[in-house]
Amino acid sequence: MSQLTVLSEDQRDALQELMNVAMGQSADRLARLTSTFVTLSVPRVHAVTDTLDKVLDLLGLGKEAMLVTRQSFLGKLRGEVLVCFGEQGASELSGLMGYGDDVDASTQDELLMDVTNILTGACINGLAQQIQTMVSYGSPSLMARAKSLREVLQEQILQGYQSLVLEVRFEVESHSFMCDLLVCITDDSAAVVIEAVDQLLSDF
Amino acid sequence: MKVLIVDDSSMSRKLVMRALPEDFATQITQAGNGVEALEAFHSGAAEVIFLDLTMPVMDGFNTLEALKKEDANAIVIVISADIQPIAQERVRNLGAAAFVKKPITPEAMEQALFDVGLI
């Protein structure tokens, strides 16, 4: 059974707050990179023990085609961050970064990897710091182009990243750019997170 | 001092309460979003407001805006994970007296209260 199925309301609340702090650091890095103001959504915690349909409903990301990048993190805390951009995410991002219309595809992909690396690093470091553990990172890569999240998540579930999905949306003010960050934590390492949450809660 | 703590996370509200100096608060009211916060403020529950920014229903920016519009007589200290320089500048422009980054510690709380002249 997944650790998440037995999370109490207090544990879920605490976990959401840990993610809030971590995602705040990601938003700050993105804002500094793009010289903009980034609006953060309230982080959400999802169990991926439900059916894929239910998970997709909860994520609210629909069936539209997306551009998805990924970066793994390793250590006691292990999993993968997926950054879901809109289908036009690459060109929106290059526009945001001040590149002209004639920017080539490889430069756009490079930008996507840079942003994935920055968002993942800030967020996972923020989370790891709070639960007092160390992580290392794999290289970011393009996971899917013009694929629905259904297809992407199906692959994730098949690979065992099914325990915990933490979600936040970043929207850049006055621009059309936005992306969703999904932190997928493996079932075995979810125990590390929950242990840290319990420690926090026991302080009260 | 009547204290209002506004945050959608109950753990975060507890952290704020724990960080307050002993005997600082004579009354503590909690709210989970901006709408609840404004209701509590209108019922006379706040001289000092500790306000989160990222919240459902009504976020901290809109709450500050509403308080500013009615020229509210309360000291607002923002406690948030949204550490973007622009966020900090905005809350100052909207009338917040101080900004403290999450997670709040007793030391950071004491410094903020000292900076705004409350201790």
Image (spheres, coloured by chain):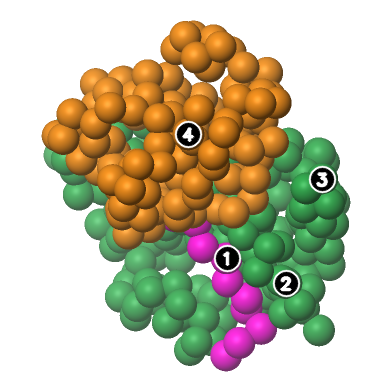
Chain colours: A green, B orange
Asked whether disc 1 touches disc 4, contact meaning CB atoms under 8 Å apart, the reply is: no
Q: Is residue A19 visible?
A: no
Residue A86 at x, y percent in the picture: 31, 60
Q: Residues within 10 Å of mark 4 (few under 14, many from 20)?
A: some
In the displayed structure, B68 sits above or below A197; it is above
Q: Which mark is residue A203?
A: 3
Mark 4 belongs to which subunit? B
Q: Secondary structure at mark 4?
A: strand
Instruction: Report the span colored magenta.
Output: A41-51
Residue denoted by label 2:
A7
Question: Alpha-carbon distance for marks 3 and 2?
Answer: 18 Å
Q: Is residue A46 magenta?
A: yes
Nearest to the eye among marks 3 and 4: give it.
Answer: 4
Q: Mark 3, mark 2: which one is toward the viewer?
A: 3
User: With B44 as the anchor, is B101 left or right in this view?
Assistant: right
Pick the front one: A40 or A51: A40
Q: Residue at x 35, y 42 (%)?
A: B44
Q: Name the amino acid type tagged 3.
A: Asp
Marks 1 and 2 share the same chain: yes
Kindly indicate whether the residue at mark 2 contacts the one at mark 1 (C-beta within 8 angstroms). yes
The quarter of the displayed image where residue A161 is located: bottom right
Identify the amino acid type marked 1: Val
